[in-house]
Image (cartoon, rainbow, N blue to C red):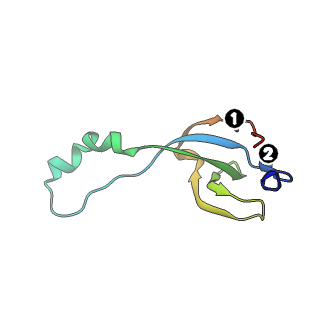
Amino acid sequence: MEWLVEDWQYEHYPLVEVLWVDTTGSSGWNSVKAELNATSRLPSMRCISVGHVLEETSDMLTVALSINCDGHCNSSITIPRFAIVQVTPLQHAPRRNR
């Protein structure tokens, strides 16, 4: 199984945890008073995503849940910078020899 990690360069894609704020809304008929009391929805707006950084600019951050050594990724998300509260670098687990 050593061939699985032999040439793997995951260091090119740092692993991070991103704390960010999403939008929220409602549908259906509600009173204006109920809609103005949106603070009850605030907890559902806080999001945490963990992934490998694919691209980072002054306007956005793109992370992917999974990447492979063939240059493919899966489950990516692009988050606008204004929605990001905090980005925390994470450490990759040490490679194990089996």
Residue type, mark 2 in image: Glu
Q: Secondary structure at mark 2?
A: helix
Reading the image, the residue beneath label 2 is 11
Depth order, front residue of 97/38: 97
Asked if 62 appears above or below 14 in the picture, the reply is below
Where is residue 59 shown, x and y percent of the image?
Answer: 65, 51
Where is residue 91 shown, x and y percent of the image?
Answer: 69, 35
CB atoms at circles 1 and 2 under 8 Å apart? no
Reading the image, the residue beneath label 1 is 91
Q: Residue at x 21, y 50 (%)?
A: 35
Where is residue 10 shown, x and y percent of the image?
Answer: 77, 49
Depth order, front residue of 86/4: 4
Depth order, front residue of 53/29: 53
- Asked whether, in this view, residue 62 is left or right of residue 40, the answer is right
* Spatial separation of the CA atoms under disc 1 and disc 2: 10 Å
Q: Secondary structure at mark 1?
A: loop
Residue type, mark 1 in image: Gln
- Asked whether, in this view, residue 68 is left or right of residue 31, the answer is right
Q: Residue furthest front?
A: 98
Q: Residue at x 64, y 56 (%)?
A: 66
Circle 1 crowding by C-alpha within 10 Å: few under 14, some 14–19, many from 20 = few
Q: Quadrant of the C terminus?
A: top right
Circle 2 crowding by C-alpha within 10 Å: few under 14, some 14–19, many from 20 = few
Depth order, front residue of 75/87: 75
Where is residue 29 shown, x and y percent of the image?
Answer: 15, 62
Q: Residue at x 26, y 57 (%)?
A: 26
Q: How many marks?
A: 2
